[in-house]
Image: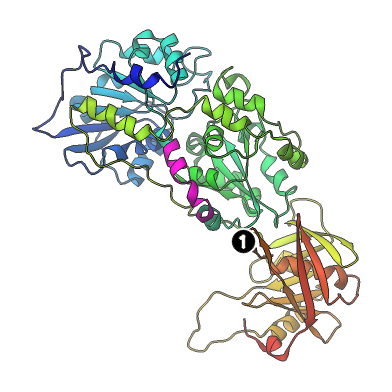
Amino acid sequence: MPSRTREPRLMWENFPFSDPHHSGPTGATGDGRTVLVAVRSAVALYRLLDVLPVLAGDDRISTCFTLVPGSEFGADALTAVDTAGARIIPWDEARSRVFDLVLVASPKGDLRLLHGHRVLLPHGAGFSKTIRSEGSPGSASGLDPKYLLSGEGSRTTVHALAHPHQVDRLRAASRYHGDRARVVGDPTLERLLASRSLRDRYRATLGTGARQLVVIASTWGPQSLLRQRPDLLVELATTLPHDTHQLALIVHPNERARIGTFGLREHLAPALDAGLVLVGAHEEWASTLIAADALITDHGSAALYYSAVADRPVIAACDGGDELIAGSPMARLLEAVPRLGPAREIHRELSAYRPGSGPSAARAAFAEQGHALDRMRQLLYGLLGLTAPTVPVEPRTLPAVSPTPCTPVAFDVFLDRSGDRVRVDRFPAATGLPGNHLAVEYGAAGERNVQSAGLLYRRPLATGPGPLDTAWTASGWSAHVLDRYPDCRAAAAVLPSGTSVLRVRGDDRLLAVRTEPRIEDGRMVRADPAAALSAVHAWVVKREQPPPALHCVLGHRDFRVVVSPATTAEEAQAF
């Protein structure tokens, strides 16, 4: 087994610039060089975009893109290239020109028709998957001899791989290509590693707060999590309370291409309505992995990136079936982590994760961590016949997740009261069994939920004043809404300060409900005022006077809630 200590000498001292097919720069004018980025799918494009910073800022190099025909995911690839703002040339033009360098992230397609030295990168991590419907049976996608051997006799093809073990596997498939493989590391992983300090920013844009973010990652194909366990997302939403957990979903770009973003959202509608965040396929999946506290996965390579960044729990929801390559890094990971049966067992499986299991598997997929862009720059500039810039190349940090998460506005609330303490578990309405009461946000939820609510609450409207501004007072709105909905037991106005003014049917006195924040490791944690109102409702529903101080328990956190008569100013406050 090649060692990491001698790998750089093996890979770089014997670099094949003396290859008989390497005749120096082609298609260049003076010092100018042309680079073609040839893509077959959106996921391949995204991997190649992570490489291009090594060429950025060099006016000797011009870059253009083309779409390699023949992929069922080609339409989404074209859209992704256009979204990136890249210059696209038609395939017929691309194959008629000579380029100094061709960058690809898939060996499939008629790449032999492209003229120029080629650098082939993986479009995932670990070469852990085989696709039954194409290529040689049992061969890892990306290492299939059916595609690799078609390039012999052409210009230099260099396989830029992430780990020495991958060189061994490539050499076993084709000695010709194995001898031309170079270990450079993984440029995509470099971006995740460089972005770890942005974790709080990513969690803030997701709206995670102090909750535990559980990310579900699904690859594509018949053995993927979404195909094998289509009901898992809603099951998790009915198991993990809203105030303690947040769910986010990463879907492979090929699966998005298969059914379209619209179709995917329609399919996921019940889970999305319950608060699931569907993150973007380009860069947001990676920033979401950094934000995550736990990962539920199938055999897709996102789990290896997650495990390389931090040692946090990983749970297997599927085993990959006959698509998983035995002995691959992903197979090692799935063998080492807990397996999720029914969704209700999620807490037990999270606790069963053994620290070190994920990083151990990730080390089998990624070498040269922290050096990948330097290695890649050395490789590409060597093939281009140019001296590399002296300015260091740095990985670009990942952007924050842009979509605004959908926050449920109607909850089935389960209460467990003991003395002055009440445990509150809120779940999105209609996803499971009815709770002790239905708490609904007025002005955000639909009329059917509003009419069925035992507790109605209203948050401040985020609108500016008009020429003749009007706004409810806390007292006026609560009286109005109880009169309009006779089945509602209590109504509360959540003021901008976070204090709630609560009116109970049959009681002329209004109550002020204030929740005290917690300090944890130098951070302030605040509960949702609506959760505290549900805690108070544990007394209201029994027609009892709530105590002046009670404890609202959300998960493992205990929040002190103070209940007192509302002041005249609070009753008259507009919101």
Q: How many labels does the image show?
A: 1
Q: Quadrant of the C terminus?
A: bottom right
Reply above or below: 562 against 526.
below
| Residue at point 44%, 17% (across, down) | 143
Does residue 409 appear left or right of residue 436 in this picture? left
Residue nearest the observer in this picture, 449 or 148? 148
Where residue 417 appears, as percent x and y from the top left, is: 88, 62
Where residue 565 appears, as percent x and y from the top left, is: 79, 84
Where residue 357 appears, as percent x and y from the top left, is: 63, 30
Task: Specify start and end residues of the magenta stretch as a single range.
Answer: 189-201
Residue nearest the observer in this picture, 366 or 472? 366
Please say whether residue 299 is visible from this viewpoint: yes
Does residue 204 appear left or right of residue 554 in this picture? left
The answer to whether residue 299 is magenta is no
Q: Residue furthest front?
A: 5
| Residue at point 49%, 42% (across, down) | 286
Q: Residue furthest left?
A: 30
Q: How busy is the neighbourhood of tag 1: few (under 14 within 10 Å), some, or many (20 plus)? A: few
Q: Residue 34 sits in which quadrant?
A: top left
| Residue at point 57%, 32% (across, down) | 359
| Residue type highlighted by circle 1 | Gly
Q: Residue 50 sits in which quadrant?
A: top left
**Residue identified by numbered label 1:** 522
Q: Residue 452 sits in which quadrant?
A: bottom right
Please say whether residue 38 is visible from this viewpoint: no
The answer to whether residue 191 is magenta is yes
